[in-house]
Amino acid sequence: MASTGGSDGAPKGEPFSSSSRSSSSFTSRDSSSTVGSNVSTEPTSLTIQVLQEITDNFSEEKALGQGAYGKVYKGVHANGEEIAVKLLHNNMSSTNDEKFQHEFDNLMMLNHPNIVRLVGYCYETQRQHTDYQGRIVFGETTYRALCFEYMHKGSLQRHLSNESHGLDWKTRYKIIKGTCEGLKYLHEGLKKPIYHLDLKPDNILLNDDMVPKLADFGLSKLCGAEQTRVTEQALGTFGYMPPEYLFHRLVSNKVDIFSLGVVITKIIAGPEGPKRIAETSNQEFLDQVKNCKLFTP
Ligand SMILES: Nc1ncnc2c1ncn2[C@@H]1O[C@H](COP(=O)(O)OP(=O)(O)OP(=O)(O)O)[C@@H](O)[C@H]1O
Ligand SMILES: [Mg+2]
């Protein structure tokens, strides 16, 4: 990791605080990517103490919500930027340091206007002692957190509504276009493609100007939960996954493209859109597409 804070007044932390771990060799953002414009600084290493301070000790008042991999809190970085702190669950026993670092590197190198920017991270092990039956025993707790730019308008899920309500068509188009561009970057703009594998409106976040940014790709790998993801989260993501992934766990870029189709349908027709389309006959559907003048400039 090139930047560990300090120059911008941010507290200086170590990626691995335990004496049993050496310093990380995190790589810097990918200069080989085809797009790069919205990043000026590299993610900063933050200690768990700093994260506790800026989230009022991970208080409920600062909580933005809870996902499959941890809880998200709002905080303000020492440089004044509002951030979202995702404190990952502590039960990631199947994830070793090497794997965590590999996936973290994936997140860190990304640089695109439609990808949520990683601004900081914490990976720290603390030795703690506790009184157990009159004896002092020592244990270790590892904290893993990822800090992202704060997205003021929240997730796309909050804004979905049918054709006649909610977002105007220009905004819907902007969200669809940005989502496609973010996904194209992950699939085609990097040395090695990244498949999102959990593309859904909850993971498309919107900034003040309603610019969409993809979030939470690679987290299943980061958390070592890939194998259990589908069964554990079937209700949340079932409708976005193609059969070959659900039943045979076949992973390819097509998984994301399938999810993208469902997302686009929901942006155009609202949460009930895909269901209505499923109930439409093939001919009726084709007629509707042919007649669709929504996106003519
Ligand atoms: N960068 C961010 N800026 C603003 N809000 C965020 C940010 N990241 C996450 N959130 C909000 O925090 C809440 C929890 O997010 P989280 O990603 O943990 O769960 P999720 O998206 O609902 O489910 P999943 O675990 O499948 O991603 C959501 O309401 C989300 O909109
Ligand atoms: Mg999410």
Image (tube, rainbow, N blue to C red):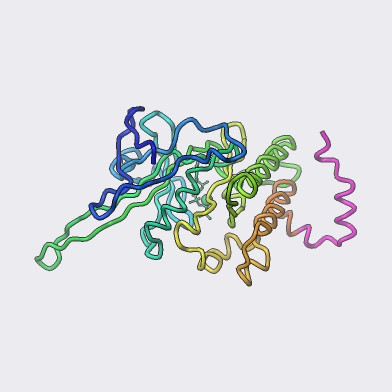
- Horizontal side of 150 relative to 170 (left or right) equals left
Question: Which stretch appears magenta?
Answer: 276-297
Q: Position of residue 21 (x, y in %)?
A: 28, 53
- Horizontal side of 159 relative to 146 (left or right) equals right
Q: Position of residue 120 (x, y in %)?
A: 41, 40
**Residue drawn at (83%, 60%) of the image:** 280
Picture quadrant where residue 46 is located: top left
**Residue drawn at (86%, 61%) of the image:** 282
Q: Is residue 240 above or below residue 159?
A: below
Considering depth in this image, is 191 or 285 the residue closer to the camera? 191
Considering depth in this image, is 294 or 146 the residue closer to the camera? 146
- Horizontal side of 239 relative to 42 (left or right) equals right
Considering depth in this image, is 109 or 159 the residue closer to the camera? 109
Q: Position of residue 157 (x, y in %)?
A: 60, 48
The answer to if 296 sits in the magenta stretch is yes
- Horizontal side of 83 relative to 11 (left or right) equals right
**Residue drawn at (42%, 55%) of the image:** 100
- Furthest-bottom residue in view? 247
Q: Quadrant of the N terminus?
A: top left
